[in-house]
Image (cartoon, rainbow, N blue to C red):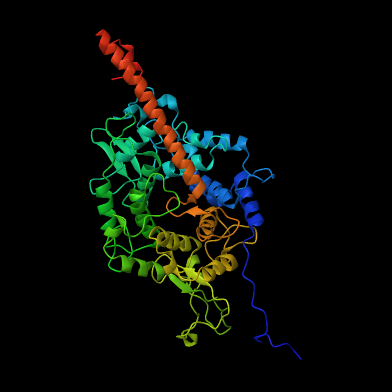
């Protein structure tokens, strides 16, 4: 007699486990081998690819001083990777996103960083995402014996000046600057909430608390205008978009909330996000609608049923790859007002209303709620965890964009970041605002402090030189050559 598979005496299925070794093997392959040809379209975003890979390895690597195994990223590799990142720094501030866009330095011999030059008109300019990823990489790759030196070589002043030029009159930020002959600086890149988040992140990582008149001071961009632009982009249903008239998106909501959070964030607080009563977050027009919209991105994942032999052939117009993955019951006749009777439901998240799920949306939703200090509103984490591990984790490691798809570095990274944010055992705890481990945020704080200390020290030395010249009543010509005005 066959056993009753529905017997209540059967033990429940165990929770799926995150295979850290398998994921590390995947990331080792991504780090040490050429990426597949599918990544050729991302040639102009190499620092982004490097961030996904390095950040994931750091998240997966135990933070233990007793770990005797050889590190996946050796000290020698760290130095080489840091040199590679620094080679993307633009003389006018910021970083280029790819080696293929770096302009030879000799092309800038007659070029002024403040005014630009027609001789360097075709230079590979820095852009906002490339600069953020470069700074994050430098912190992730910091020398373990000298974490304070993570930003050694970064031109803090010039980068902050460049960042300020990226802000438009309405408070928004662009992606790239271009000098148009006779017209001045042109801000390119469209209106995108991601650039607002990037600007707030770079500002928090580099600016510090330098007061006007002190060495190292740089005029700040208009934070009030940026905040107003973000706050005005909340939509009628509570979400955030590029403007209040556009469709809200979970990724934009994360960028909006995180940008406001970073503008309010103390310089030395790494583990506590600002509460929703912080000055900027409290100005969100409809916070209950926002949290409702974010939590409404969840739904129970129902595995699509195979087509029956009587079904007609699909229309040639119905072959959109993402829409082939159906997260609804395939037939209206089988719909029910009750959730499916399953001992282990799977909960997925989408980025927009009536769209299919995607690995990264679990991150955008959960991290946004975390930055609002509203994480409990998400509900039970285990069903979402099961969805990621049972449907999105790949057999070779990494995470896919959709069930049954191949892994890629973007979705594999954000699959790990959300599990880290939710306290997955064996992973480093993540900071929801900057999307790097909390230990890395501490490195950023110390590295920023060293840059500010250097600026103050150099400033004092310059004041002594100028004072001595004034006492003698003479000003030698070489002062201008060393930067003393």
What residue is drawn where x is 47% and y is 40%? 98
291 shown above or below 274: below
What residue is drawn where x is 54% and y is 34%? 146
What number of labels is visible? 0
The residue lying furthest to the bottom in this view is 1
311 shown above or below 235: below
194 shown above or below 16: above
Q: Position of residue 234 (x, y in %)?
A: 29, 62
Q: Position of residue 468 (x, y in %)?
A: 30, 12
Quadrant in the rendering for residue 31: top right
332 shown above or below 225: below
Q: Say whether residue 136 is left or right of residue 470.
A: right
Q: Position of residue 174 (x, y in %)?
A: 32, 46
What residue is drawn where x is 23% and y is 36%? 183
The residue lying furthest to the right in this view is 1
Residue 298 can be seen, yes or no = yes
What residue is drawn where x is 57% and y is 83%? 308
92 or 389: nearer the viewer: 389
100 or 437: nearer the viewer: 437
Q: Classify the position of the C terminus by image quarter.
A: top left
Q: Position of residue 379 (x, y in %)?
A: 46, 71
Residue 155 can be seen, yes or no = no
Q: Say whether residue 468 is left or right of residue 441.
A: left
Quadrant in the rendering for residue 295: bottom left
Q: Classify the position of the N terminus by image quarter.
A: bottom right
Quadrant in the rendering for residue 242: bottom left
64 or 114: nearer the viewer: 64
């Amino acid at each position: 007699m066959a056993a009753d598979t529905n017997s209540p005496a059967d033990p429940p299925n165990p929770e799926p486990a995150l295979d850290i070794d398998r994921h590390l093997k995947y990331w080792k392959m991504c780090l040490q081998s050429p990426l597949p040809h599918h990544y050729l379209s991302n040639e102009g975003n190499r620092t982004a690819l490097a961030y996904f890979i390095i950040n994931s390895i750091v998240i997966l690597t135990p933070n233990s001083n007793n770990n005797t195994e050889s590190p996946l990223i050796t000290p020698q590799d760290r130095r080489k990777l840091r040199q590679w990142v620094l080679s993307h720094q633009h003389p006018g501030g910021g970083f280029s996103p790819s080696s293929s866009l770096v302009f030879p330095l000799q092309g800038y011999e007659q070029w002024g960083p403040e005014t630009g030059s027609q001789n360097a008109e075709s230079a590979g300019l820095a852009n906002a995402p490339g600069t953020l990823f470069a700074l994050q990489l430098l912190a992730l790759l910091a020398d373990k014996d000298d974490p304070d030196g993570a930003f050694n070589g970064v031109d803090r002043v010039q980068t902050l000046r460049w960042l300020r030029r990226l802000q438009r009159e309405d408070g928004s930020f662009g992606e790239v600057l271009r000098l148009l002959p006779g017209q001045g600086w042109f801000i390119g890149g469209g209106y995108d909430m991601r650039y607002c988040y990037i600007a707030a992140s770079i500002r928090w990582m580099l600016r510090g608390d330098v007061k006007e008149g002190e060495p190292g001071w740089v005029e700040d961009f208009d934070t009030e205008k940026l905040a107003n632009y973000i706050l005005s982009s909340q939509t009628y249903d509570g979400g955030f978009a590029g403007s209040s008239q556009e469709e809200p998106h979970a990724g934009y909501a994360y960028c909006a909330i995180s940008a406001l959070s970073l503008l309010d964030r103390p310089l030395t607080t790494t583990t506590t996000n600002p509460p929703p009563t912080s000055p900027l977050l409290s100005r969100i027009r409809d916070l209950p609608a926002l949290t409702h919209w974010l939590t409404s991105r969840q739904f129970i994942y129902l595995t699509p049923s195979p087509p029956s032999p009587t079904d007609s052939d699909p229309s040639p117009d119905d072959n959109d790859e993402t829409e082939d993955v159906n997260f609804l019951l395939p037939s209206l006749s089988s719909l029910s007002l009750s959730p499916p009777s399953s001992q282990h439901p799977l909960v997925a998240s989408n980025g927009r209303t009536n769209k299919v799920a995607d690995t990264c949306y679990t991150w955008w939703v959960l991290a946004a709620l975390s930055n609002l200090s509203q994480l409990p509103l998400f509900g039970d984490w285990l069903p979402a965890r099961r969805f990621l591990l049972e449907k999105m984790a790949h057999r070779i490691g990494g995470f896919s964009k959709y069930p049954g798809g191949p892994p890629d570095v973007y979705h594999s990274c954000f699959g790990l970041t959300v599990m880290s944010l939710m306290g997955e055992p064996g992973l480093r705890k993540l900071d929801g605002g900057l999307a790097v481990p909390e230990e890395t945020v501490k490195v950023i704080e110390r590295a920023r402090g060293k840059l500010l200390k250097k600026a103050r020290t150099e400033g004092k030395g310059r004041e002594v030189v100028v004072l001595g010249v004034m006492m003698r009543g003479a000003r030698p010509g070489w002062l201008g050559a060393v930067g003393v005005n």
